[in-house]
Amino acid sequence: MSDNINKISDEALDNVTGGARKVVYGDSTDYVNLRKGPGLSYKKVGELYDGDVVYTVDKVYNEDDGYSWTKLDNGYWVASHFLH
């Protein structure tokens, strides 16, 4: 992991992992990008759509892009603010 990517504390991680999360999308897009790693610089590998249910396994903060990223059980990452 890059020096600019910080693991979220175990306590905070408990709040986002271990259960289904619904994917939502922003006002200006129809989908959310899945990425190969936790950051905008990682290659896009797919898309998730509003209402898709995903399972989370990890969460980190990337200082380079200023976003928290959640790792899914399929090994790919999504910006955390799209999950709830």
Image (spheres, rainbow, N blue to C red):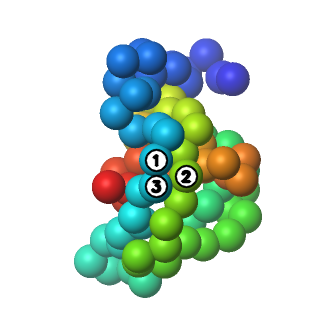
Asked whether the viewer can see residue 4, the reply is yes
Instruction: Provide the secondary structure element on which disc 1 rests.
Output: loop
**Labelled disc at residue 76:** none
Q: CA distance from mark 2 to mark 1?
A: 6 Å
Q: CA distance from mark 3 to mark 1?
A: 4 Å
Residue at the disc numbered 2? 55
Instruction: Provide the secondary structure element on which disc 2 rests.
Output: strand
Residue at the disc numbered 3? 20
Give the amino acid at mark 3. Answer: Ala
Identified at 46% across, 47% down, the residue is: 19
Give the amino acid at mark 1. Answer: Gly
Evaluate if marks 2 and 1 touch, with contact meaning CB atoms under 8 Å apart. yes
Residue 6, above or below 82: above
**Labelled disc at residue 19:** 1
Whole-percent x and y of residue 68?
42, 38
Asked whether the viewer can see residue 32, the reply is no
Residue 33, above or below 73: below
Evaluate if marks 3 and 2 touch, with contact meaning CB atoms under 8 Å apart. yes
